[in-house]
Amino acid sequence: MNNNVIHLIKKMFPPDSSAYIVYEHTTSIPQDVLHVLFDANFNSSIELPPQLKYLEMGFYFNQPIILPPSVTHVKCGHRFNHPIILPNGTIYVEFGVAFDQPIVLTPHIEYLIFSDSFHHPINIPPSVKHLVLGGCFNHPISIPGDMEYLDTGYRFNHTIQLPSTLKTVKFRGHYNQPTNLPENIKSVNFGEFYNQPTTFPAKIKYLSLSGKYNQPTILGPRLKTLDICSYKIEHPIILNNGLKRLYISPHCVWTSTLILPTSLKYICFPNKYNLPTTFPSYVEDIHFGYEYNQPTILPASIKNVVFGVHYNQPTVFDNCHRLRKVSFGVSYDRPTDLRQCTQLKHVCFDEFNSEILLPESVKTVVFTRSFNQPIIIPRSVEFIKFSDEFNNDIHIDQPSSLKKIYFGEQYNRPISLPTSVKKIIFGSGYNQPTTLHEGIVDVSFGTLFDQDIDIPSSVTHLTICNSFNRNLILPMGLIFLFMGVGHVSPMIGIQLINNYNFLYTYNDDTWLQQHISKNKHNIELKMMTLVDFLIQHFYPPARRVNSFGHYY
């Protein structure tokens, strides 16, 4: 279901808090109820109250049902597929994915929504203003003169006369017919197969072109957003001055230099675009494709920039005082001075191994691969992740804001942690005497760590891997303990405190269970799957960085 339909449902139906909810065990509904909502698992025959106005079926409901004449709004569930008679006063009707029955539409319907399975011919009443056809629907239709919103579905491919009142049209998938767009239309989507010469009216604000579209194009002066998802653009597309957002999909082959309007604020280039380009002075967000590798002057207005895989040009950031986020690709490896970027918050490097100077504003720093240079961590940094190759000097400016620090596999140097740190992950190569401060919450030692260690009482999550074999007193607040995979000898001297309610552990460790039982600890040992453990502990969210440098 698309976001427009979800928003429409929320607008057309009262809040769930006002509904009478019908659960699996419900056998009757009070007679004065106006709004009924079936629970997802409800699937029994039931009589509806005579004054009912709003009916929302649940996911599994699939029983014959009689709607009372008072009903004005009907939302069928995912599984519902029975013949249904709509009352004459019905205004809103939405059918679920499974519905595929002939239907007589009543004369007062304004909002009509079909889903994927429906493929029967229909006569659309003149009252309909909002129409969504299902993915399988492919019959000729006549559009009412007052319609404002039309979504034709994936298989629809018939000539159609669009009314002058239409504000939004979405042609999907197979549609490829000559089309006259009405003068007042504001939003237009063309699907994968559309490739017709088209005149775009002056009032369009949003336009999406997809798939096979490859036509000379003149855009209207009021266009604000242009999304181009075509396979190849060989003909000129003249961008209007007034355009704010230009997105060109990564797979699109673009063969000519883009002349960007001065009004543009957002631009996303396709992967194969690699032509010299001048950026307008107001652009705020630039996403380069894989192959872009041209000398680039960033405008002073820039706030977010993502460089592609092949970019490796000397880049001056002295004027980028508004820059908040920058992500470099695999090929970039040059000394970089970002100290003039006084609003920078996030920076991400890939295979980078050169000198880096960071501003006092930065909060998140990620080195994905290769980095092994001495580094000064500004006091503003809250999270830093080092690459597996890093094993060099670290200076942390004080007072530090650092909360999370993740080391890679090769780091093995003494380190003094600031008291602000709440979480630290050491890689497999780390084996140094370590002092943990009170206030740290989550600590993970790698495979080779085998040092005497005092665990502060604040620690709730602790990972100690294969090589560790020392006396260890665990804190009372501990809720997660990981003791390594396949350690040969049991850990000696471990002390568990009776105040625990439970411990999570990945290992199905018989020795630990016996220790708990032998010493009469009232502790429940909960097992965690390996997949869950890896996701939650070794691959925390900041390790997952997408191609645009966004952390998720």
Image (tube, rainbow, N blue to C red):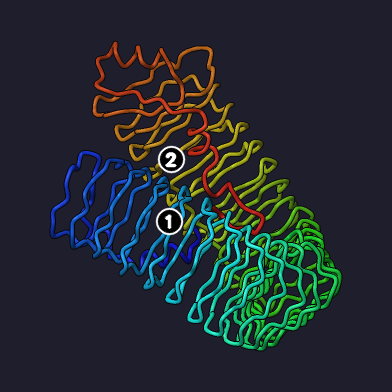
Q: Is residue 311 left or right of residue 378?
A: right
Residue type at the position of mark 2: Asp
Residue 501 in sight in this render:
yes
* Label 1 element class: loop
- What residue is disc 1 on? 95
Out of 135 and 384, give the one closest to the viewer.
135
Q: Calculate the distance from the C-alpha at mark 2 to the C-alpha at mark 1.
A: 49 Å
Out of 274 and 342, give the one closest to the viewer.
274
Q: Nearer the viewer, mark 2 or mark 1?
A: 1
Residue 542: image location, x then y, percent: 55, 50
Q: Tell me which residue sits at (80%, 76%) in the image.
A: 258
* Label 2 element class: strand
Residue 188: image location, x then y, percent: 61, 74
* Badge 1: residue crowd in 10 Å (few <14, some 14–19, many ≥20): many
Residue 321 in sight in this render:
no
Image quarter of residue 180: bottom right
* Badge 2: residue crowd in 10 Å (few <14, some 14–19, many ≥20): many
Image quarter of residue 477: top left
Residue 262: image location, x then y, percent: 70, 86
Residue 400: image location, x then y, percent: 48, 57
**Which residue is farthest left?**
31
Looking at marks 2 and 1 on the same chain, the residue that comes earlier in the sequence is marked by: 1
Residue type at the position of mark 1: Phe
Q: Is residue 331 left or right of residue 284?
A: right
- What residue is disc 2 on? 442
Q: Are marks 2 and 1 in contact (CB under 8 Å)?
A: no
Image quarter of residue 201: bottom right
Q: Is residue 15 left or right of residue 138?
A: left
Label of residue 197 in the image: none
501, above or below 155, in the image:
above
Out of 208 and 275, give the one closest to the viewer.
208
Q: Tell me which residue sits at (34%, 21%) in the image.
A: 495
